[in-house]
């Protein structure tokens, strides 16, 4: 058991909430604020950062004090500085967890870590989404039924251009007939990565109790562990006598 609370940083573009009154009505403190409030109630130590802060709120000291980074982005992926992406990338390889939400499938950091286009098909018609648990043994599925429904969401459909997940936790079915791999687990270096599909900004998805439970479960799963640190490069002293 960890002696201290898991340190979570919720990162958000924070553009829709300022520009679109529909989104502002759903998330008056921003999507990051809604997620942060919930996660604090679950006992995590939570801070937030947004795109327009200096260094996008992701300076070296902030990342060094982060166990799990949650990332939501949509319309301004191109504005994220490449140097900041490289910094986050390094921290993930060194063990920081990363949870990528909804349209952040196109985030530079997600594409850099997965090495593919991370593209998909989409349609916004407020369709019903049923999310099926296909890895009931996985910690991210803890406390869920075998499926749950979101009454209105944006459709994402296959093909989802990502590497095959190391574990696929969820598959979504949409009212229009499409299916989608909605909960994908990866490891890169020492870092654990979880992609979770729901979360279009014009729907109250981040007030949905099962969606929030998944995110909290994912934070616990993605938090760094205390295993041995790997060493790299020239190693002149063999562990056994020659």
Image (cartoon, rainbow, N blue to C red):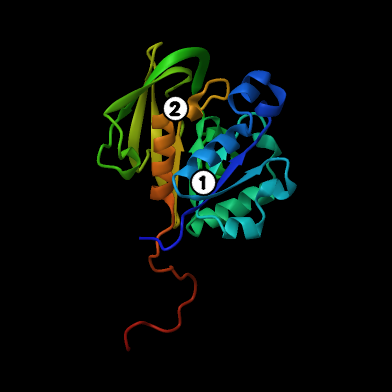
Residue 111: which quarter of the image?
Answer: top right
Q: Nearer the viewer, residue 159 or 110?
A: 110
> Is any atom of residue 163 visible in this view?
no
Image height of 206 relative to 90, above or below = above
Report the side of 134 relative to 175 (left or right): left
Image coordinates for residue 126, horizontal then vertical, percent: 49, 13
Residue 34 % position (x, y): 55, 35
Mark 2 closeness class: few <14, some 14–19, many ≥20 residues within 10 Å: few
Q: In terms of sequence position, does the residue under pointer 2 or pointer 1 come before the other? A: 1
In which quadrant will I find the C terminus?
bottom left
Taking the spot 53% from the left edge, 15% from the top edge, the residue there is: 124
Residue, disc 2: 208
x and y, in percent, of residue 193 in the image? 45, 46
Q: Is residue 193 above or below residue 180?
A: below
Q: Nearer the viewer, residue 201 or 35?
A: 35
The CA span between labels 2 and 1 is 29 Å
Q: Residue furthest bottom?
A: 241
Q: Nearer the viewer, residue 91 or 160?
A: 91
In this view, the residue in front, 205 or 133, is 205
Residue furthest to the front: 41
CB atoms at circles 2 and 1 under 8 Å apart?
Answer: no
- Mark 1 Cα shell of 10 Å, populated few (<14), some (14-19), many (≥20): some
Q: Quick one: SS at disc 1?
A: helix
Residue on which disc 1 sits: 113
């Amino acid at each position: 058991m960890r002696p201290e609370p898991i340190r979570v940083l919720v990162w958000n573009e924070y553009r829709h909430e300022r520009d679109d009154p529909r989104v502002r009505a759903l998330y008056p403190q921003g999507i990051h604020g809604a997620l942060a409030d919930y996660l604090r109630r679950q006992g995590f130590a939570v801070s937030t950062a947004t795109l327009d802060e200096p260094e996008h709120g992701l300076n070296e000291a902030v990342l060094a004090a982060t166990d799990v980074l949650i990332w939501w982005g949509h319309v301004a992926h191109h504005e994220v500085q490449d140097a900041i992406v490289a910094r986050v990338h390094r921290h993930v390889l060194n063990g920081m967890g990363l949870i990528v939400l909804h349209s952040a499938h196109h985030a530079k950091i997600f594409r850099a870590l997965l090495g593919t286009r991370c593209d998909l098909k989409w349609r916004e018609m407020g369709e019903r989404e049923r999310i099926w648990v296909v890895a009931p043994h996985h910690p991210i599925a803890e406390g869920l039924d075998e499926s749950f429904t979101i009454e209105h969401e944006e459709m994402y459909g296959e093909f989802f251009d990502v590497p095959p997940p190391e574990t696929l936790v969820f598959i979504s079915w949409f009212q229009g007939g499409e299916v989608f791999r909605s909960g994908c687990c990866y490891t890169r270096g020492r870092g654990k990565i979880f992609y979770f599909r729901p979360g279009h900004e014009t729907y109250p998805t981040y007030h949905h109790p099962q969606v929030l439970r998944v995110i909290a479960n994912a934070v616990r799963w993605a938090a760094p562990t205390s295993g041995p640190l790997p060493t790299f490069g020239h190693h002149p002293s063999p562990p056994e006598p020659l």
